[in-house]
Image (tube, grey):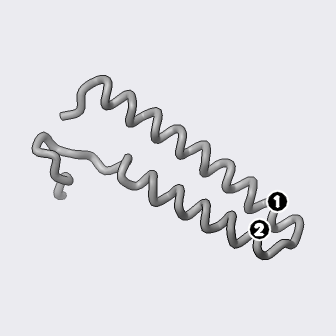
Amino acid sequence: MLTNSENRERKYHFWGWGLFLVCACFFIAAGIKSGDALYLIGSIIFFVACIFFIVPLTIKKNESGDSKKK
């Protein structure tokens, strides 16, 4: 079970990565508008990388630390 401090830290990490996702969306839009393929590809890779960092934050853990099985 997560303590209150760990839960708060997890929430801040989640919101931080969420803001990075918002930035990535703006970068993608700017890449599309400018027509720069390299800028667009880099922005999409950045967006996907942010998703990979968010996934572990959304997985609930049980008391033994293992992933919850459904």
Give 29 or 70, whichever is nearer the viewer.
Answer: 29
- Which residue ends up furthest to the bottom in the rendered image? 37
Q: Which quadrant, please, contains the N terminus? A: top left
SS class, disc 1: helix
SS class, disc 2: helix
Residues marked 1 and 2 touching at CB (< 8 Å): yes
The count of marks equals 2
Q: Which mark is residue 39?
A: 2
Q: Which residue is mark 1?
A: 30
Q: Residue 49 in the image: x percent, y percent?
A: 53, 61
Kindly report the distance in space between the C-alpha atoms of the residues bearing marks 1 and 2: 8 Å
Q: Mark 1 belongs to which amino acid?
A: Ala
Give the residue drawn at x 79%, y 76%.
37
Q: Earlier in the sequence, mark 1 or mark 2?
A: 1
Q: Residue 29 in the image: x percent, y percent?
A: 78, 60
Q: Quadrant of residue 35?
A: bottom right
Circle 2 residues within 10 Å: few <14, some 14–19, many ≥20? some
Q: Quadrant of residue 8?
A: top left
Give the residue drawn at x 65%, y 67%.
44
Q: Residue 40 in the image: x percent, y percent?
A: 74, 69
Q: Mark 2 belongs to which amino acid?
A: Tyr
Q: Is residue 45 above or below residue 6?
A: below
Give the residue drawn at x 18%, y 58%.
70
